[in-house]
Amino acid sequence: MARSSGVYGEGAKPGAVPRVPVQDQGGHDRAPAPGGDGPGRPGRSGGTGGPGGSGGSGASEGRPGRVRRALRWSATALSLLVLVTVGAGYLYYEHLNGNIHKGRRSSGASGAARTGPNAAGQTPLNILLIGSDSRASDENVTLGGGRDSRGNPPLGDVQMLIHLAADRRSASVVSVPRDTRVDIPKCTDPATGKTYPPVNTIINASLARGGAGCTLATWENLTGTYIDHWMTIDFAGVVRMADAIGGVEVCARQNVWDRPLPGVPGGSGLKLTAGRKKVQGVQALQWLRTRHAWGSDPLRARAQHMYMNAMIRTLKAQNVFTDTGRLTDLAEAATKSLHVSEEIGTVKRLYDLGTQLRTVPTDRITMTTLPTAQDPQDANHLVPAGADADRVWSMIRDDVPFDGKERPERSDWRTGMARSQQSALNSGDLPGATDARDGSDAGPCMDVYAPYRW
């Protein structure tokens, strides 16, 4: 019997259509697809066999299988990526929350009542910002000096109230110089349980008599206004924040060097040439602490307002809230630098607070210093200046903007009645001698007290 030919296959009769081996992509022979009768011939599935065709139903089943496997792998990889990203985000969020130091909102006696919402559900927001001279760490001792005072209770050398209007269209900021004599109420330190009796002394001592909560109670009694939150920052925190922002522009009209002079010890160490300069890190801290070179404590407050206004302009120009990288840097610095009252002691609440503050136009942020007079008991101290100081606090209580840009016809936020029916004060009714600056004003420069020029 003749051996069968590979051309016709075993038992194939002469004249039959040859079964031509099909080569795969590697060049190896394989049998034609079962549904195909030869190259280029239609198979039962309607496909074409051989090169250039679909290879019939077998090939049509192979490719979708590979696609399904690829999709499954892609979905699995994407799911893992999402899980890792979400997990990392959660861990970072918890890391930031772990950075935040919190304390009791109030630790002193105060009769101030919380302001109720108006018909639109709006209420003003009051935040007390305190700069502490704490030397409780090596870093703060290095930055602030005074190694002999390490471990002493901190003093609140910078204190300012930020009042955010009920409609969030304006903000008013009032500083009280650190040497202003006021009534400090009975306070209990939440950390130690120690109770301090009421006392009449300079306001910076309030921080050492029960922490920031005692300073808040002091301000509530001074202003007659409920204060929602407090924030404190120390020397190291100022340096971190200034570096995270990337520097803040300030201006001195003459060369300035705040240094010890005969009979006048101390000094911040600030040394700048005249003109506009960007300060950051330690130099930013020196600017904020300088007092002798400006000539007085109220003038130091003016320099601090210049810095704060410039910082706000810088942050707005950087689009921090839409730039993830910048926001992350600032969040890291802020959560490490700020101590806050417990009700805002999470990243989310601080972020929400920040979004409310950023809605205020820069030219409607007005900073001023409480009018003061020389203390008759001590020429080195100050006291609130009677009717002028009372007017400032009345404007805060009545939610009357400092800037004079409010429309006269606007109704009162509490009742919907015309403001003239509610308050004798109008927008911009600050006392004539008040040193007020709006946030958009980049023009002023600080005059340097002559002995500190170089």
Image (cartoon, helix red, strand yellow):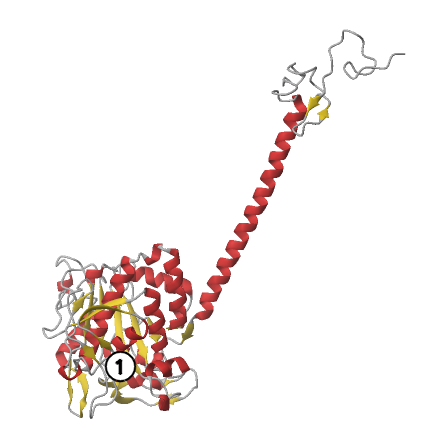
**What residue is rendered at 43% in x and 86% in y?**
193
Q: Answer with left or right where residue 9 lies relative to residue 234.
A: right
Where, quadrant-wise, is the N terminus in this rendering?
A: top right
Q: Is residue 39 left or right of residue 260?
A: right
Q: Between residues 312 and 368, which one lies in front from this camera angle? A: 312
Foreground residue among 326 and 415:
326
Q: Nearer the viewer, residue 173 or 89?
A: 89
| Picture residue at 81% right of the left edge, 12% below the top | 12
Q: Is residue 364 above or below residue 45?
A: below
Q: Tell me if residue 436 can be seen.
A: yes
Amino acid type indicated by mark 1: Ser
Give the residue number, with chain letter if any, for mark 1: 268
- Whether 297 is drawn above or below 364: the answer is below
Q: Quadrant of residue 435?
A: bottom left
* Residue 234 is at least partly visible in this image: no
Q: Quadrant of residue 306?
A: bottom left
Q: How far across and how far down the image is residue 92, in percent?
A: 48, 62
Determine the image quadrant of residue 49: top right
Q: How many marks?
A: 1
SS at mark 1?
loop
Eyeballing the image, is 374 above or below 124?
below
Front-lying residue, 359 or 47: 47
Residue placed farthest to the top in the image?
15
Q: Quadrant of the C terminus?
A: bottom left
Image position, residue 395 (x, y; %)? 18, 70
Q: Position of residue 40 (x, y in %)?
A: 64, 15
Q: Position of residue 15 (x, y in %)?
A: 76, 6
Judged from this view, the residue extending furthest toward the right is 1
Rate crowding at label 1 as few (under 14), some (14 to 19) or many (20 or more) other CA atoms within 10 Å. many
Where is 53 relative to 159, above or below?
Answer: above
